[in-house]
Image: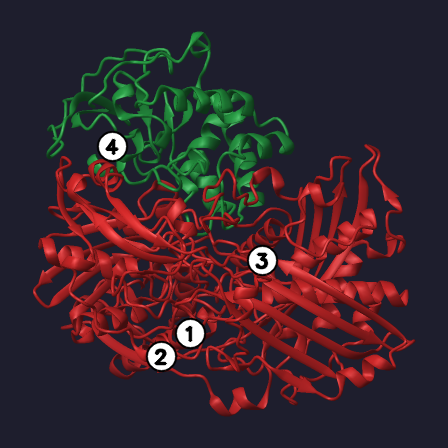
Chain colours: A green, B red
Amino acid sequence: MADESETPLGPDCGDLDELLIFGNPETRRQFIKQVAGTGVAITIGVNFVSGSGLTTEQPVAASPTTPGGDSVKTKLKINGKEYALDVDPRTTLLDALRERLHLTGSKKGCDHGQCGACTVLVNGRRVNSCLTLAVMHEGDEITTIEGLANGEELHPMQAAFIEHDGFQCGYCTPGQICSAVALLKENHAKSDDEIREWMSGNICRCGAYPNILAAIKGAKTKTST
Amino acid sequence: MNTPTVGKPLTRVDGRLKVTGAATYAAEFQRPQLAYGTLIQSAIANGHVVKLDTSAAKSAPGVVAILTRENTPGFKPYPDDLTKKGAPGENRMPLQDDEVHYAGQHLGVVVAETFEQATYAASLVRVTYQAQSPIIDLPDQRAANTATTPEKFIGREDLQVKRGDADGALAGAAHKIDATYSTPVENHNPIETYSTTAEWEAADRLLVHECTRGIKQLQRILAACFGLPVEHIRIICPFIGGAFGSKGFQWSQTLLAAAAARLLQRPVKLTFSRSQMFDSAGQRAQTEQHFTVGADKNGKLVALRHATTTHSSPISEYTEPCGNMSRMLYSCPNVDVTHRLVKLNLTSPCPMRAPGECPGVFALECAMDEIAHETGIDPVEFRLRNYADRDEHQNRPWSMKNLRECYERGADKFGWSKRNQKPASMRGRDGSQIGFGMATAIYPAAQQKAGATATLNQDGTVVVRSATHEIGTGTYTAMSQFAADTLGLPVEKIRFELGDSAFPVAPNNGGSWLTASVGPAVIGACGELKKKVLDQFGHWPNERELSSLSAPIRSEFTSEPNKEERGKFSFFSYGAIFVEVHVDIFGQTRVKRATGVYDVGRMINPKLARSQIMGGLLFAISTALFEATIPDQATGRVVNSNLAEYHVAVHADAPPEFDIDFIDKPDPHMPDLGARGIGEIGITGAPAAVANAIFHATGKRVRNLPITPDKLI
């Protein structure tokens, strides 16, 4: 980037996390305002999502490079595997996953954090991977839809989505499932209303919501017994 | 012999691929040396381009080519049948001249090594225009100057229909209503945006990965426009991330991606942003529908006049056929249906889920509610009094109609009898106003020509192929069920393959006709295969016999609609939809309950069928309460071209109670299993049910969609 000056997000941003952006419109507006005010790419990272600084024993994959233009070396740990990347600093986590690492399970639907199709888990929390840059995630534990199953054995949430027909075209499904996995961990599945509210960041244009609700309740029962 | 699977609630055979992220959508095919394209689009809506300055963009890092009118060889014209007679899609070849007809029109493509580089470089393109003020609104006098009265919808359905003497009957009617309903521009907004990856495998051979629900049509378009034999074009599309009417017909991005790939001699991927889904992928046209309805003192309809004004773009003749169901849904001796088309500087419209039926039946079913209210008759009773026992427009019998049973069962399940007929008479404990509303749902049951092959392999699996599509309706599953049942094999032994133009012919995925069209082809191909195998072995071969097969056994079948049968009857699906709404003091409407009973012929898979209808109902609730594409009055550009400002129903908007039921009787005049379509009927009628329930809750009749809080306070 020509202008690398880091504009801090302001005093509040230590508390700002994407989970809140997801659920709290006030925080979301604030976030957008602040980002718009910076005039440069957001290079936040440290205080955005608390990195757990995990080490890995797995070998680092071959290092694909960005052809042409400036690039930044970064390492991403995805589904337990570490990848070294030379990445254009403008690359979102979503585009790094899809276009560079060919992990296309995470979907692109709007590029604005409005549809939730790109939802992945970063250190166990759900994050819109289109709203965050790849270079911000060195040291984070990233789980995508490809990393949920245990070998051939589906994650209970994946199995429940099939059983309850929680999708039609399937395009929003990876995001729905990642979001639903985090939802149970957040303990935001205490009632139907609560599930509906806390899953409203994931749009399903096919209208599978009632089945998604049933799938989440089904998976909740299975994982709690 | 295995037990038949048709009628059983099988889970989707492609479910595992979809929940693991392994289902591959158009933008997800890795190609060697892939370059990324970003569109250059017009910022004005009417005028022409004076200068397109690409100098800064050219020198931006990573840029490998910029495709503009200057360096793009002219395309040969689209096939005639796709541009004439009001066909959906555009009739102007991309980059053919400097004229601009709507904001967002494609002016070129910037191609770079990466998506980021292409996106940035496209922002450096400077365009100078000579602009004229755009025509944006239906009532604009300049729009009126372009008005025509098209005779047919895509060369098929009559758009100007007169039966009896509506004027005379209205003059003597005991009860009368006169009302104008309007619906806004809406966009399909599937969550997967358009994507094309074009690649020239040889100088005269083109491979395209695109999310198209018209594989054979796109193949034909590309062959025509590049002057190549059809078999030199290959389209691949195993999964589509939703379509709802988009992702069909001819739009310029496929040609632009292919032209860029040819210029560069490497694959080029062009994927739309969400914003481009509002100006480059078609949309539902806005409509203004004037109803005049008369009834006698017993609540029998005597006259129905339905006059629609809608729009197309300057480069399309597509007409939203709002009045088609008004011709025959109810028994009425005097009917006058008209359609008037004007040209606006908005992106070219095209079908969107239930084109015509969605806005048209909304208006018709609101008008029925209004006239029922006027006569003091319960809305269900009013519809029963005007029940059409035959198609009075085409003057022939229905293939099968169980709509009466839909009304009765629906009313019973919903508890319609508890409704106090007086508007604004029911309140909830939280002070919200409660209303019950209902409407009729209807959608034509069509059938098209389709083919399939079936192949028995040495490992005992049967591969069935057809160039059809999976947009989420469950094609993989339903076709596997047909194949399994025909062959007497378990579904696990069947592999149904679609989404490849090299496969046998299948129609565009639309019109709710996929199952009734491709189903008979699959059943036919599998029937032939079974016969061949039994002729050879005398029984279904065991493992040892299979492994000794010298070559797979193959059969092919093409199915066509029975013209004689289609001419004798009128084919429709029906439904009755009941909803309960709560309107709070802020004017916010919540749909709390929905009960729908549908007569759609035989259920192939009740689990998937229920999902389809439920999805249609949610789409309908979204249409009734939220959706509107808003063009800026000065510039003609869409001001809410994103999913935060173009509201679609989210999870919290889903009614807590959904009760969907089916009559489940096979239509004796539909092919094979008697299934009619279910893809679109869910969205018909239901927006009116919501509007009618809001009237019942509040006493306010809102006639323009969407019914946002500002219209209720």
Q: Are marks 3 and 2 in contact (CB under 8 Å)?
A: no
Q: Amino acid at mark 2?
A: Asp
Question: Do marks 1 and 4 share a chain?
Answer: no
Question: Do marks 3 and 1 share a chain?
Answer: yes
Answer above or below: position of B711 versus A177.
below
Q: Which residue is mark 2?
A: B81
- Secondary structure under badge 3? helix
- Secondary structure under badge 4? helix
Q: Which residue is mark 1?
A: B87
Q: Nearer the viewer, mark 1 or mark 4?
A: 1
What x and y, as percent, mark residue A193?
64, 32
Is B86 placed left or right of B111 in the picture?
right
What x and y, as percent, mark residue B307?
66, 73
Circle 3 chain: B
Residue B668 shows in this picture: yes
Question: Do marks 2 and 4 share a chain?
Answer: no
For mark 2, does the 10 Å Cα neighbourhood hold few (<14), some (14 to 19), or many (20 or more) residues? few
**Residue B177, located in which quarter of the rendered image?**
bottom right
Residue A96: mark in rendering: 4
Q: Amino acid at mark 1?
A: Ala
For mark 1, does the 10 Å Cα neighbourhood hold few (<14), some (14 to 19), or many (20 or more) residues? many
State the residue in front, B516 or B555.
B516
Residue depicted at 55% across the width and 53% down the height: B615
Q: Are marks 2 and 1 in contact (CB under 8 Å)?
A: yes
Residue B25 shows in this picture: no
